[in-house]
Amino acid sequence: MNNSMKNLFLLFSGAILGIAFVSYVFPGDALSDKDAAREWRRLKEVFVDVSRYYVDEPDPKKMVDGAIDGMLETLDPHTVYIDREEMQAVEEQFDGHYDGIGIEFMMQNGFPTVVSPIPGSPSDRLGILPGDRIIAIEDESTKGMSQDEIVSKLRGPRNSSVTITIQHPGSDDSVSVHITRAKIPIHSVIAAVMLDDSTGYIKLTRFAMTTADELDEALQSLREQGMQRLILDLRFNSGGLLDQAVAVAGTFLPAGKKIVFTRGRIGAANEEFFSTSDREKFEHPLTILINNGSASASEIVAGAVQDWDRGVLVGERTFGKGLVQRQLRLRDGSAVRITIAKYYTPSGRLIQRPYGNGRDQYYREAWSDSLVAVDSTQQQYRTAAGRIVYGGGGITPDVPVPAVTLSDGTAQLIRERLFFEFASDYAAKHSQWKESPSRFMREFTVDDTLVRAFLRLARKRGISVDTQQVRRDDDFIRRRLKSEIARNLWGSEKYYQAEALGDEQVRAARESFKRLRVLLRQE
């Protein structure tokens, strides 16, 4: 496939933003069609009449935006309009970078609080740490600012500077820091760690322009640490660029294997994509984690691996998004993302779920039936080894494992960011752990005393604690406290390592390696 075609296709769920700009010519007879011309005149008449006679002076932009949204809502759930203001975020997500100071933050007790500095960023080099509160930007208090306001003030042109005032956890003193903004990468691989002496774990969150290269680097790093088997975590990865999905899948498949094919109304939309010999291959045992947040590009990778019996899928049924979009830039800087094709896995499966009952129902169903058994309407297909797989409703895992469900009380503790607040204070007072992350992972235990201290903080913050709910969610609470302490000590990668080590779905993935050949019917 030539380079111009590689940038043609985009894969998205409803929750993700992506970008690739291409020119487009409609099928030759589209604008000359008599029916289309008649409907266009009707729309124009309504616009003119409303503009002329409406009781108040209407906003023409709002009317046109509404007309575009209404038009696209009659189509599939993934054909959408993106206004000019949203386009910057779209570009950043898939270009893989933005200009800023390089921190992850959340709003905590009214102030932006650093979750983690991005490694190698200006914030990281200046020693900004997890838990630091940004109490002012350019001498203006951040108390009560919205998250969007904070982002707007911290980002800016590369090489420009901004002054922020930092307050460290447990201290009433503050310090002002001058930071020069720089190019900040948006990583697709947010964790690449060893879970034991032979098991590597990679968490992949998006399919952007740098994803395949990041995966190569992560695999090489884990190989050097002795990796002999891999868990690839695609949970909540809602998609991205098709060429990156093909490259990632091709990392795990021999050259010449079909990965995905697309079919649409226009000839340019009909393509077949194969693994190539120009990628270094990962040939060790493979398990992929999926759930109902895994969509589009994630489903391409999972579907190809499953169809070729290359690895085992563990977790929950995927979202079921099998449509391909082309994004077209409009003259005012906005864009329209149009579905131009459907995609199919190597065995011929269409992964797309039905959407005839409207967009609201479409998304509700995606999040409510992740482990529902395959229904009788789904067509059966066969993998290379003859295993039965299903189309038309997402990808069903080989090893179904439900996610942990939490009580309302524990969910509130998460929403109020109590885990992060408690961990930030704890890490500041117990920095001796910082010397050895491996020892922390092996030996640190969230004991009853620590849990009671956490619950006291919740009550102090006015959150009622239901003892029965706490007992029900005890394993999760202890895991999340350890994970957040790890994040505050070393950053987000160690957070994901601690989470993985206590995660039931990850545990099932590790167990699946013991019976991999049986699951894949290779013996």
Image (cartoon, rainbow, N blue to C red):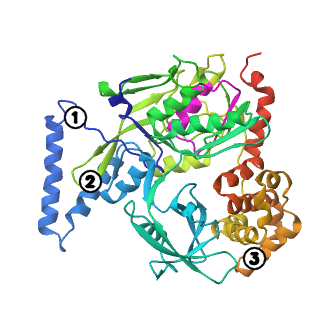
Judge left or right: residue 356 versus residue 428.
left
Q: Which residues are magenta?
A: 281-306
Judge left or right: residue 301 versus residue 438.
left
Classify 292 as above or below 424.
above
Reply yes or no: does residue 73 show up in magenta.
no
Reply yes or no: does residue 294 show up in magenta.
yes
> Is disc 1 surrounded by few (<14), some (14 to 19) or many (20+) residues within 10 Å?
few
Q: Which residue lies under the disc numbered 2?
A: 333
Classify 158 as above or below 133.
above
Q: Amino acid at mark 3?
A: Leu
> Is disc 2 surrounded by few (<14), some (14 to 19) or many (20+) residues within 10 Å?
few
Q: Which residue lies under the disc numbered 3?
A: 457
Residue 75 percent coordinates (x, y): 36, 43
Judge left or right: residue 124 versus residue 441.
left
Q: Secondary structure at mark 1?
A: loop
- Along the line of sight, the residue nearer the viewer: 115 or 306: 115
Q: Which residue lies under the disc numbered 1?
A: 25
User: Of the residues under marks 1 and 3, which one precedes in the sequence?
Assistant: 1
Judge left or right: residue 271 versus residue 495.
left
Q: Amino acid at mark 1?
A: Val
User: Of the residues under marks 2 and 3, which one precedes in the sequence?
Assistant: 2
Identity of the residue furthest to the right in this view: 448
Q: Amino acid at mark 2?
A: Gly
Residue 451 percent coordinates (x, y): 82, 68
Q: Quadrant of residue 431?
A: bottom right
Q: Secondary structure at mark 2?
A: loop
